[in-house]
């Protein structure tokens, strides 16, 4: 397993390089333009000058090479300088600059990271924690009332998109409930809010309730369905009968033996989901104005902001490759029969 | 804003301050605490020269200011100067080639240093630097020299007589930057100065505390602001992002925000929000017109890339019977009612404002399906093959009608398609994501400039109150084509010698009345020759909380132009 | 869960057994009936109802449910019932085709990668690549490159249909592939597979007879989630102007357009929301029943 992990890690480098090139070509070819959202009163010669100043018109390969250099060589050094106060001679070099804000892309990402991790990360955690018990009980008591309710709620939860469920909870909790009521919740997330004491924590909690719940609904639906299906498959296996025949406690049978063997698809889904925490939740962030990484990405896409889109998507790609590797390692731990070598 | 002179005087003496505050709108600086503004498009930079986006210009206008700006009635008002230079007061030279601005004495930047003519000159150099990619360079068109005569006098020289010299340093798009702060940010270095671009030092009522690009701006009152007792608010939270519905809701229904910008929403949605009782919408009208552009070239996909939307004429849109019938079939009052409500008016003109330029020679507020049918019938367009669309000499009246993606536009498309089908013209609809449609990417077939469709719908406007450069959008040589990499503003490819000659005359004429006369003729010509079918004169609709006083919606300049006068109604 | 005793069925076509078992599953049966009703409704409904979904009757706009308009009318006076049926046609077609495409591709990649060790690396790296691609720019590129060509070959509606289905299908198979592969990796090492291999079962037979039936549950779940996903992705894309022409109703689009009217006309949001949820639920129950019916251990219980 160890040699496998090392080999896969080494293989990651060419894979990621190839992925970065494909992403670059797609983002570059896509017809959004950095001047697309400017008012029509700005004539096209001026737009062309703006493009020229941004370096949009340089040859593709030059732009890609520059991006590679900035992302892999310059930005890590700047990070080290910041972290340790070293001087690695980065002064005067042009950083990876966003077309829209004319500021370093990495700074934008660092600025957005906290609110995204806070909201989307919490939602993922909450969603998973709710989903696992629901999935397990639903499978164990298949076709019971609990199972049927679970199915109904999770299916509706999955088929109702956040652009609707988000607005619905806003209308319910921010509009219908008067704002001086205890149950009123803010419809617009305050990204400048800092938690310093109990009061500010309570405010942070209140403003997170709606976006977290809307997101968690979808995550719960998905994970609980996969858990339930996989548990059902395993509950009928011979080893369960054997374990029971040996007089093992029912709790041990279900929660240790069956659960462990049912985790493979669940681990896959969760491993696929964790990078998406970083990707943010585009629609939910938009509805509640969380303005995290998802909103950064969508605005950058709409604004033809190639450096931002490219960098965000590439970091996303790194996480995907990494977490899929972690999932593969976990398979081996969950089921020692799985061999990669 | 009703400032009672007696109270204003009294405010200076400390004993009367409580009374002044009780009145609600005068008193000491920062007395009203916090105000919150929401723009559903988030500002990404505070320097309007590096981004022409309205959201960025308006956010910036709270901090950096021009020498003069337009008031809510479209008049020029002095801002950082004592008076508007004219030929009468000698500020504009007799030959119309120079304009001299006299800066109001005693103005200081928010860091306490004096505001001088050197800053003004620097700003011109900054924008006119060819490597900087300045988005507002058109403001400086024709400027050959900007000269600081003394500390408080700036003289701008143009390369030819300029009847309307109020381009540079006028309006929110062209404010003054501090020379000391931006000295190292000229030319190619403009992009790398993110610190300066996010936190510009200005003369405005507020200064930036923290700028989170595309998210939120925190500002506080500028303690060096030139007017005593202003601004009334100590801090500003300027939130961006989301959509217009959510912004309107936050002001009018939940009361979380005080001011919401540009609510492009269906009238009944706005009306319902108003019932929330926390705020009210305000509308103002500039020259923005929602219009149909009729392609004067042949957009057939069978033509090659060098010919498509380049060669003339269009198979049928050049026929006056066809384009007149298309216009007659449209029920404009209904479009206004459904799409814009209070924020829309029927118009037959390409230039509906300012009033002096609004032509009154045409009427179009009555739908006339029967008349349109007769017109087509008489011109020989009949449905000879029974496929639902009229035809003549093998040409079918069937067209592709495209627009950008936007709920109101899609409703308009559906309605107009139906009306046209009633007069025997079939339409295929297409909507394109606005970042692509307006993006101008020469490789994309879907840009409004390429116009690979017969009819397209969008809105356009002009800055300030003079439409000369806007009217230039009808000149032959401004037509986009492969030779110009599809650049150019004459989207319909309208080409008319008479029009070109008339526009030339306009650019050499001074005097508002004479200019307005020519402007109206140009407007009538382009509409009557069938290049444009104007639909709706659109206003700007914003909303403010009932507790926010002093709001004067301004469509000629930044909406936040008088933010220094805003106050809390108590 | 009680212990199962297997009853040997009389020797007949095993698909009859499957059908018998499926019939006994009440949820599956109800789901199937609903599903068929929805399909019939969207196919024959517009023809029976006879009202054009794009016809604008501006005088009767914003009406509540009535005899003339059982689901009311929208802001332009179009009949919502007719729009629901016409929209269902597109949404169901897009949802089912895109789901089938995603499922087929996902299962194929997952099984092949899990079963053949040599192909695992390259196929999973390809999966990683597809997972990492940003959907929106990708679609913009696809549309820019292919729309005009497909339009001229299949007409504007056919062209955009093929484009949407293949775009949604091509970008949603990766999860299924990863999940199936994970399960295959584990099942491959089970005793019965080793046994089958030791008697020289060829790979093809091995996959179809032994591997596939055992990874059916996650595939069924993917199918259910996939159909909802496809319908909603389509709505997001039409909203961005990347989908069908604007006057062309789909469920997702109807839902999206009515969200602004949530407070005034709540029923307008309800119809498409209900339709999508019911479709997804019925597919879910059918999937449940099918899985049970295909599992020999449960079948005949």
Image (cartoon, rainbow, N blue to C red):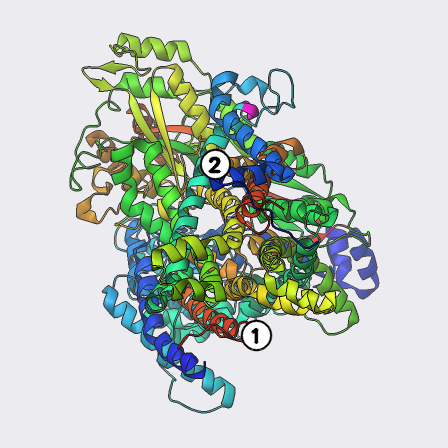
Residue in front for this viewpoint, B276 or B144 = B276
Residue C117 shown in magenta: no
Task: Look at the image and give the residue range highlighted in magenta.
Answer: C77-81
Question: As drawn, is B537 to the left or to the right of A72?
Answer: right
Residue in front for this viewpoint, A319 or C32 = C32
Label 2 element class: helix
Residue at 15% in and 41% down? B306
Using the numbered discs, state the Cα–Cα distance from disc 2 to disc 1 in whole angstroms: 63 Å
Q: How many marks?
A: 2
Q: Magenta stretch: dominant SS? A: loop
Question: Given contact means CB atoms under 8 Å apart, are the residues at marks 2 and 1 in contact?
Answer: no
Question: As drawn, is C27 to the left or to the right of B407?
Answer: right
Residue at numbered disc 1: B112
Label 2: chain?
Answer: C
Query: How many residues crowd mark 1 within 10 Å: few (<14), some (14–19), many (20+)?
Result: few
Residue at 37% in and 75% down? A12
Q: Based on the displayed image, in which of its 4 quarters is residue B343 positioned? A: top right
Residue at 31% in and 66% down? A21
Residue in front for this viewpoint, B351 or B537 = B537
Where does residue A112 sit, x and y in percent of width and height?
54, 67
Report whether residue C161 is seen. yes
Report whether residue C215 is seen. no
Residue at numbered disc 2: C91
Label 1: chain?
Answer: B
> Do the residues indicated by labels 2 and 1 lie within the same chain of the protein?
no
Label 1 element class: loop
Which tag is nearer the camera, tag 2 or tag 1?
2
Query: How many residues crowd mark 2 within 10 Å: few (<14), some (14–19), many (20+)?
Result: many
Which quadrant does the N terminus of chain C fall into?
bottom right
Q: Is residue C192 above or below residue C137?
A: below
């Amino acid at each position: 397993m160890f040699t496998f992990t090392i080999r896969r890690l080494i293989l990651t480098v060419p894979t990621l390089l190839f992925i970065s090139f494909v992403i670059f070509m797609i983002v570059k070819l896509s017809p959004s333009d950095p001047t697309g959202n400017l008012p029509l009163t700005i004539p096209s010669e001026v737009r062309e000058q703006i493009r020229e100043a941004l370096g949009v018109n340089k040859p593709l390969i030059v732009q890609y090479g520059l991006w590679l250099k900035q992302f892999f060589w310059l930005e890590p050094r700047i990070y080290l300088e910041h972290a340790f106060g070293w001087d690695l001679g980065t002064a005067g070099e042009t950083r990876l600059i966003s077309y829209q804000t004319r500021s370093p892309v990495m700074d934008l990402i660092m600025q957005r990271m906290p609110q995204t991790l806070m909201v989307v990360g919490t939602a993922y955690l909450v969603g998973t924690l709710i989903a696992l018990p629901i999935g397990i009980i639903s499978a164990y008591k298949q076709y019971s009332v609990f199972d049927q309710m679970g199915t109904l709620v999770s299916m509706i939860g999955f088929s109702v998109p956040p652009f609707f469920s988000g607005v619905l909870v806003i209308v319910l909790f921010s509009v219908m409930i008067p704002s001086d009521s205890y149950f009123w919740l803010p419809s617009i997330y305050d990204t400048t809010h800092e938690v310093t004491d109990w009061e500010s924590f309570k405010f942070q909690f209140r403003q997170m309730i709606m976006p977290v719940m809307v997101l968690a609904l979808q995550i719960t639906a998905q994970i609980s369905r996969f858990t339930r299906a996989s548990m059902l498959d395993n509950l009928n296996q011979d080893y369960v009968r054997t374990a029971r025949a040996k007089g093992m406690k029912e709790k041990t049978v279900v929660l240790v033996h069956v659960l462990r063997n049912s985790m493979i698809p669940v681990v896959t889904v969760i491993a696929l989901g964790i990078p998406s925490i970083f990707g943010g939740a585009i629609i939910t962030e938009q509805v509640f104005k969380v303005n995290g990484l998802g909103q950064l990405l969508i605005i950058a896409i709409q604004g033809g902001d190639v450096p931002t889109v490219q960098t965000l998507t590439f970091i996303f790609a790194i996480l995907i490759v990494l977490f899929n590797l972690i999932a593969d390692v976990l398979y081996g731990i969950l089921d020692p029969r799985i061999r990669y070598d | 804003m009703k400032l009672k002179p007696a109270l204003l005087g009294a405010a200076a003496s400390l004993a009367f301050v409580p009374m002044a505050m009780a009145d609600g709108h005068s008193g000491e600086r920062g007395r009203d605490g916090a105000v919150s503004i929401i723009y559903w498009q988030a500002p990404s930079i505070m320097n309007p020269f590096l981004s022409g986006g309205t959201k960025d210009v308006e956010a910036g206008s709270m901090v950096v200011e021009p020498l003069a700006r337009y008031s809510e009635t479209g008049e020029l008002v002095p801002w950082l100067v004592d008076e508007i230079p004219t030929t009468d007061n000698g500020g504009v030279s007799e030959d119309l080639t120079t304009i001299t601005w006299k800066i109001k004495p005693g103005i200081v930047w928010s860091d306490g240093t004096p505001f001088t003519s050197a800053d003004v000159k620097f700003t011109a150099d900054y924008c006119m630097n060819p490597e900087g990619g300045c988005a507002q360079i058109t403001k400086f068109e024709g400027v050959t020299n900007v000269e600081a005569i003394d500390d408080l006098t700036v003289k701008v020289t143009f390369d030819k007589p300029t009847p309307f010299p109020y381009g540079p340093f006028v309006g929110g798009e062209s404010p003054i930057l501090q020379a000391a702060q931006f000295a190292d940010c000229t030319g190619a270095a403009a992009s790398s100065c993110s610190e300066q671009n996010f936190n510009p030092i200005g003369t405005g009522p507020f200064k930036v505390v923290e700028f989170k690009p595309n998210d939120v701006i925190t500002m506080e009152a500028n303690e060096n602001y030139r007017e005593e007792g202003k601004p009334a608010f100590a801090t500003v939270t300027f939130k961006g992002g989301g959509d217009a519905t959510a912004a309107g809701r936050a002001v009018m229904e939940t009361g979380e925000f005080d001011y919401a910008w540009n609510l492009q929403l269906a009238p009944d949605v706005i009306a319902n929000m108003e019932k929330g009782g926390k705020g009210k919408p305000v509308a103002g009208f500039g020259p923005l017109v929602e219009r149909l552009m009729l392609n004067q070239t042949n957009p057939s996909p069978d033509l090659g890339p060098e010919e498509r939307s380049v060669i003339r004429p269009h198979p049928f849109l050049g026929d006056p019977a066809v384009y007149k019938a298309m216009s007659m079939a449209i029920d404009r009052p209904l479009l206004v009612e459904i799409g814009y409500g209070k924020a829309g008016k029927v118009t037959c003109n390409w230039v509906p404002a300012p009033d002096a330029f609004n032509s009154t020679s045409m009427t179009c507020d009555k739908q006339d399906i029967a008349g349109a049918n007769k017109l087509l019938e008489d011109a020989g367009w009949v449905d000879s093959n029974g496929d639902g669309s009229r035809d003549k000499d093998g040409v079918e009246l069937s067209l592709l009608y495209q627009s950008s993606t936007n709920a109101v536009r899609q409703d308009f498309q559906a309605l107009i398609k139906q009306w046209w089908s009633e007069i025997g013209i079939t339409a295929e609809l297409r909507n394109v994501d606005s970042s692509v449609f307006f993006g101008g990417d020469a490789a994309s077939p879907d840009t409004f400039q390429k116009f690979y469709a017969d009819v397209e719908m969008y809105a356009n406007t002009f800055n300030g109150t003079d439409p000369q450069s806007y009217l230039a959008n009808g000149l032959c040589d401004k037509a986009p084509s492969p030779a110009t990499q599809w650049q150019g503003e004459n989207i319909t490819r309208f080409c008319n010698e008479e029009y070109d000659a008339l526009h030339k005359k306009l650019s050499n004429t001074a005097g508002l009345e004479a200019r307005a006369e020519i402007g109206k003729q140009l407007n009538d010509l382009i509409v009557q020759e069938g290049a444009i079918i104007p639909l709706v004169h659109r206003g700007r609709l914003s909303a403010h909380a009932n507790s926010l006083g002093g709001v004067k919606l301004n469509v000629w300049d930044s909406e936040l132009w008088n933010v220094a006068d805003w106050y809390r109604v108590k | 869960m009680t212990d199962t005793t297997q009853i040997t069925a009389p020797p007949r076509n095993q698909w009859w057994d499957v059908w018998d078992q499926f019939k006994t599953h009440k949820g599956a049966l109800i789901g199937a009936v609903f599903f068929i009703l929805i399909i019939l409704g969207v196919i024959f409904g517009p023809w029976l109802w006879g009202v054009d979904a794009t016809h604008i009757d501006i005088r009767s706009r914003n009406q509540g449910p009535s005899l003339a308009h059982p689901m009311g009318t929208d802001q332009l006076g179009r009949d919502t019932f007719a729009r629901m049926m016409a929209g269902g046609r597109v949404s169901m077609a897009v949802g089912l085709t895109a789901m089938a495409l995603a499922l087929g591709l996902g299962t194929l990649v997952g099984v092949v990668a899990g079963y053949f060790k040599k192909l695992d690396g390259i196929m999973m790296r390809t999966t990683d690549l597809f997972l990492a691609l940003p959907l929106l720019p990708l679609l913009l590129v696809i549309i820019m490159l292919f729309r005009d060509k497909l339009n001229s070959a299949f007409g504007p509606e056919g062209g955009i249909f093929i484009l949407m289905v293949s775009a949604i299908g091509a970008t949603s198979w990766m999860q299924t592939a990863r999940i199936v592969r994970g399960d295959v990796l584990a099942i491959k090492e089970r005793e019965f597979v080793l046994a089958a291999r030791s008697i020289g079962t060829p790979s093809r037979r091995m996959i179809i007879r032994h591997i596939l039936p055992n990874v059916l549950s996650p595939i069924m779940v993917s199918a259910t989630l996939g159909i909802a996903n496809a319908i909603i992705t389509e709505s997001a894309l039409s909203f961005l102007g990347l989908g069908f022409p604007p006057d062309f109703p789909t469920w997702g689009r109807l839902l999206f357009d009515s969200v602004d009217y949530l407070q005034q006309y709540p029923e307008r949001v309800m119809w498409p929301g209900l339709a999508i949820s019911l479709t997804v639920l019925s597919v879910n129950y059918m999937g449940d029943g099918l899985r049970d019916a295909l599992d020999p251990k449960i079948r005949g219980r």
